[in-house]
Image (cartoon, rainbow, N blue to C red):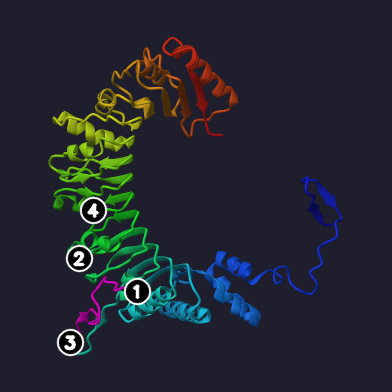
Amino acid sequence: MTDTFKEDNSVCMNAKPMDTGSKDAISFLPEEVLGKILSLIPTKQAASTSVLAKKWRYLFRLVHNLDFDDSDLLQPEEGQQERDVMRESFRNFVDRTLALQCASPIKKFSLRCGIHMASELACVGRWICNAVERGVLELDISIQTFYKFVMNSETGVVEQPADAKYGELFLPPEVWKSKTLVKLTLGTRTTLGKLPPDVSLPALKSLCIDSIFFEYEDLCYVLLPGCPVLEELVLRYKSYEGFPYCISSRTIKKLSVHYDCEFAIGTISGMSFDAPSLVSLDYSDYALAEYAQVNLESLVEARLDLRYTKNVERLDVSGLIKGICNIETLHLSPDSVDVISRCVKDGILLPVFNNLVKLSFGSKKNKRGWKLLPYLLEQSPKLETLIIQGLDGCTADVTMHPFQVKVLHVLGYGGTAKEMEHLKSIIVESKCLETVQVEVAQGVVVDDAIAWQFYRDLTMHLGVSVSSKCKILVAYFM
């Protein structure tokens, strides 16, 4: 029995199935549509359709997204001989797939694989060059180098292959001259060697670097200057040396920096940001001793996650804070609050945030962090929205200016008496408050009845402090 839907969404039983003749369910579709469908499925499956018929062999040329990943074939429990065979099988598969497509245009090319011997570099270079020559728009390359060491039969010494340096990935020069590339992603835990001095990527708008070692500061002085319309830059380094601590670009509007390399922090003197067009900054790192140059005159929103480390003798984030003082929205993680509090205790002064209208503030369970909040509020005369997290750890007297915040958003609320008292002390006589929204912490078992009780408690305890027109909202996870 077949069910079909009418236009009014009612079900018509026993409807006659559509007669497609002797064809299968999709062969009658236009070739462009079939090409788009093939582009949505894994490349290995899409390539397998080429054996169905001559038509499908031609249709595979219309696939504009190619994704190759050797982890789909290699398994950790396999022996060395089996892995060698599978790696050869992977190389043959990529070669055959690219040959099937001839020179048809391509939008996205993704390659994730390991290189276990220097001779495999030629294969990787050939594949990438093929994509670039076909006008690829998006290139996602994630290569890990595992060059084998060999035994010298004459000396008995284990040696590295002479035709490449360990850990280096040499991309074909065509990559650095692409006129079509719009998005480039490079990784992981490798070095590109010395970049050519004449990098030219005139269409590149998005660049993502994941644990790539750049020699001679090539990122800021060679690669970025060769990207005249770059708008987004992402830098991710985890437990890997060589991360750049000078970021300079006249064009980027969105910057995301995520560093997690505490062991190398002691060798870094400071961090510099020179990005006058930047609008959004997401910066996660261990706090440093100096932020000498912070040129972010167009910045609107900043998200800071600065972590404390004993590897830096004296923290000083004053340069960074002063450099972002014109922002409208500021998100401070609990770690950032802790770091800034330490610096304030050591004598640094916070600037006035004349344009700040939204502040997100998280704190750990200590007095140091919560003592910072009144200071921040005092330095933010136009603040309208305050988001606080970690109210259960509030151990200091915090009072908002009565004519300041209009919206108070509390995250991670547990409904305890301690939290209620701290919330009351924060609000005091805030007659300007228009909305108090309390979001119950995940993990707290809440149903409609408990949520209603939370609402009643909040209304009863906060009613004397806020205007009768103030809305009190309770949000919770089912």
- Amino acid type, label 3: Thr
- Amino acid type, label 1: Ile
Classify residue 30 as left or right of residue 396: right
Nearer to us of marks 2 and 3 is 2
Report the magenta residues as a range. Answer: 156-171
What residue sits right under mark 2 in the picture?
215
* Quadrant where the N terminus is found in the figure: bottom right
Splitting the image into 4 quarters, where does residue 432 fall? top left
- Amino acid type, label 2: Glu
Q: Residues within 10 Å of mark 3 (few under 14, many from 20)?
A: few
Measured Cα–Cα span from mark 2 to mark 3: 33 Å
Of labels 2 and 3, earlier in sequence is: 3
Measured Cα–Cα span from mark 1 to mark 4: 30 Å
The image's mark for residue 115 is: 1
The image's mark for residue 264 is: none
Taking the magenta stretch, the answer to whether it contains residue 167 is yes
Residue at x-position 19% and y-position 82% = 157
Residue 109 in percent (x, y) is at: 45, 69
- Amino acid type, label 4: Ile
What residue sits right under mark 3 in the picture?
155
Of labels 4 and 3, earlier in sequence is: 3
